[in-house]
Image (cartoon, helix red, strand yellow):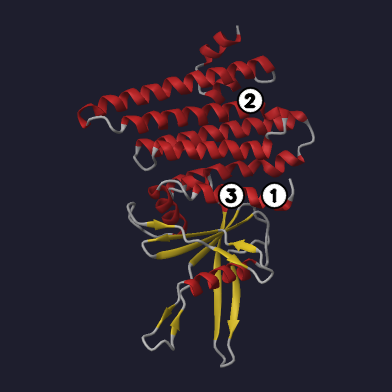
Amino acid sequence: MAKREIRQIFDLLLKRLLHLSRAATVQFINGLFGTSHPADSGVEYPNTESVSRNLRKRQSDMLVVIDGRTYHLEAQIRDDENIALRVFEYGWREALRTKRASEDGWNFSLKFPRAKVIAWETTGKTPDAAVLTLEFSDGGRYDYQVEIFKFPDHDIEELEEKKLWLLLPFCLLKFRKRVTAARTSERRRELAVGTMELLNEMDAVVDRAIRSDLLSAADAGTVLEYAQDLFEELYGGYSEFKEADDMFKEKAQTRSQIAARRGREEGLEEGIERGIEKGREEGLEVGIEKGMEKVARNMLARGGFAPDTVAELTGLPPERIRELAQ
C-alpha cells in the first residue's frame, strides 16, 4: 500500500469516528487532552477547507469545537520533522478565521486551537513534542509546542481507562509490520490468531462500556464496523486471515443488529424498559454465540487450528467445539 494511500485511509477513518455521537466525541477529547467537558457539551465541526495559492483545495485533518474551545488533531503513520510547521499553519488559518478585534479596530486577538498529533507508529527518534520557535525582531521568542500521542505506547487497557473508544480499531496496526515481514504462511497464521485475540479484547471493552452506559450500542457497533474495514485494508489480501475476517464480520454484524433493535425499542414505555433490556442482552448473547459457531466451523474445516485454540478464540465451550468437529 502506497504511503499516501495509508495516510489517507487512517485520516478518513479517524474523521469518521470523530463524528459518532456527541458523548463519544466529548469522552475522546477529554481522554486525549486531559480535559473535563461534561458529556452533554455542545460539539461543532468547523469547515476547515481552504484554497492554496495554486488554487487547490486543502483541508486540515480535524478540528472539533466543544463548548467554544477548539481542538486540532493531526495524525501520522511515519515521523514527520515538519509536523510542527503544518500544525502551526492550520492553527494560524483557524485563528485568522476566528480573530477578534478591539473596539477601535486596531488591535486583534488570535486564539490558536489546542493541538495534538497522534503517531500511529513510532521510532526511536519520535519525540514527545514537536517544537516551532518563533523569533521576533524585538528579541521576543516563543516556543510553539505540539504534543505527540505515541499510540504504540498505550495498550488497550489504557484506552479503556481513558475512554478512548474511538482509537480501538487502530490497535490492529500492531500487527502491520510483522505481517509484512512474515516469510512463512505459518507465521502469518500465528499473527492472524493474534488479531482474533485482539478482537475479543476489543469486543469485551465495548461491551463493558455499553453496560456501564458510557458508550451507546450504536457507537459500539460502528467502532467494530470500522475495525473490520481497517482489518480488510491491512490484512484482507492474506489467505491466512480468512477466519479472522469471518470473526470480525460476525461480531460487527451482531453489534449492528443489536444497535438497530435497541434504537427501535427506545420508544417503548418506561414501565417495560427493564424487561426489554433483559431480552436485548439475551439476544446479544445468542447472536454472538451463533456467529462464533459459524466461525468455529470454518476454522475446523480449514484445519491448522487445534480445538483448544478454536475454543479460546471463539469463547465457545470445548465440548461444543468437539460437537462441531464431528
The numbered mark, 3 or 1, whose residue comes first in the sequence reads 1
Q: Which residue is mark 1?
A: 5
Name the kind of residue labelled 2 in the image: Glu
Marks 2 and 3: in contact by CB < 8 Å? no
* Quarter of the rendering containing residue 175: top right
As drawn, is 46 to the left or to the right of 191? left
Q: Residue at x 42, y 23 (%)?
A: 285
Residue 203 placement (x, y as % from top left) = 48, 34
Question: Where 131 falls versus 194 (above or below)?
Answer: below
Residue 225 image label: none
Q: Residue at x 62, y 29 (%)?
A: 245
Name the kind of residue labelled 1 in the image: Glu
Q: Nearer the viewer, residue 50 or 187?
A: 50
Name the kind of residue labelled 3 in the image: Leu
Mark nearer the viewer, 1 or 2: 1
In 3D space, how far apart are the residues under numbered discs 1 and 2 (Cα atoms)? 26 Å
Residue 152 in view: no
Q: Which residue is mark 2?
A: 243
Q: Nearer the viewer, residue 193 or 75?
A: 75
* Quarter of the rendering containing residue 326: top right
Q: Nearer the viewer, residue 194 or 23?
A: 23
Residue occupying the far right of the picture: 183
